[in-house]
Image (cartoon, rainbow, N blue to C red):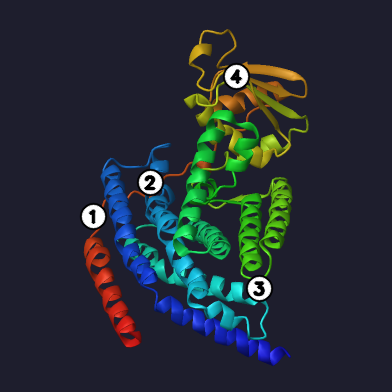
Amino acid sequence: MASPSRGAFAWLVAKDVRELLDARAWWVLVAAMGPLVGFAFIGAVRTYAELSGFGGTSYGVGEAFSPLVGIWAPTFSACELAAAFLLPFVAIRLLAGDVQSGALALELQRPLPIWWRVASKTLVLALGWIVASVPTLIAVTLWISYGGAVHVPELLVVAFGHLVNAALTLALASAAAAATDHPATAAIATLAVTVGTWILNLVAAVQGGVWEWAAGYTPTAMVAEFQHGLLRADAVAAAGVLVAAGLAVSGVWSRLGRPVARKLAASGVIAVAAVLLLALCGRLTASVDLAENRMNSFRRGDEAALAAITAPIAIEVHLAAEDPRRLDLDRRVIGKLRRVVPAMRVSYVAETATGLMEQTREHYGEIHYDVGGRRVVSRSTTPEGALEAIYDAAGVEAPPESDADIFRGHPLAVPPTGAALTFYGVWPAAIAIAAFVRLRRTA
């Protein structure tokens, strides 16, 4: 029984590959990726070169000359844009097209579980996305040819983050295509969910609480972490849960002939299970900072000193959600502290969202650091100010600074030679020729 199943699966994969190659939407995606990546890469290299003309060897300034921040994050952001607005149409074309043409009914006649059909299409779409992402590899090659530095771990985590983002998009589009009766409806539903995640991020910035927790697992938030070189166990696990849930819903709704009520019930069970698993994912605290400049971490000496503090640490922040100082504190201090002291407790005290009407209050703007019952109050939102207050409250001496902790950066003042011709000319022309040959053969 195993051999016929393997043969049927291979037949299904080959069929899905042919359908992908015959899909004009996929060729448009591949062709558009060149100019999208090229525009981002050329702009990033020009800005990097302009700033590099001022040097880049002093502390602080060198951090601006990290390829992770200056090149990879903006270049790969083109993938995020393509995944949000172009990839769903490719997925829906492949998934909903079978329902519209009646091919799904023919597939169901073969001795193959419905989950294998979902797996086949997901595999083919993932491979299609990887092919479409080749321009990012060209950008890396060009950067190396310019003499630019490449820290492989941070580059890999950025690429992995965008692959995860694409997988989330494919899972969402797969579920929408299976649950709706028309590709246009599926496209609207997918776009609505995407816009909904953006709105969730806005609500979280104002309301905090459970909204902030939920917003932390939106594709935009997770991609931002990956683009900073941070690999978080909870983000990877949560992405896996969301992808599995989307594909499971797709499998449920792909079963022809089953009552809608039964499909809705099964989808509800999957949604509840996904929420529970996401709550468990939030308990994972392991993370790895793969950024060469350690932008997500304190100095190694400070991390060792913080880890040696056995007393519980609690922080009370008197800043409103939309106060720029709170945003700065969360990004530069709280996030780094959580990586070293996962059990740290943080509470926010504010009566308004903007804080404009609270500026004259006595304690607004204060940050209370409590270590084992001893409290120190500070108004600084810088890492140096926060660490000084924690060390003071803990009664420990700050570790000495080391030159090894200073990231000098990799300044490079060179123009993006040949990039415009490659991304705006050679790549679109090559894809247009390949598409013409393929589509003419199957016309």
Residue 415 disc label: 1
Please give the residue where the numbered disc 3 appears in the rendered image: 115
Q: Amino acid at mark 4?
A: Ala
Q: Amino acid at mark 3?
A: Trp
Quadrant of the rendered image containing residue 137? bottom left
Q: CA distance from mark 2 to mark 3?
A: 47 Å
Q: Amino acid at mark 1?
A: Pro
Q: Is residue 78 left or right of residue 419?
A: right
Q: CA distance from mark 1 to mark 2?
A: 15 Å
Q: Residue at x 71, y 33 (%)?
A: 344
Please give the residue where the numbered disc 2 appears in the rendered image: 65
SS type, badge 1: loop
Whole-percent x, y for residue 126 in the image = 51, 69
Q: Is residue 180 left or right of residue 48?
A: right
Quadrant of the rendered image containing residue 349? top right
* Residue mark closest to the camera, 4 vs 1: 4
Work out which quarter of the rendered image holds the N terminus and state it. Answer: bottom right
Whole-percent x, y for residue 411 in the image = 34, 48
Q: CA distance from mark 4 to mark 2?
A: 37 Å
Is residue 332 in view? no
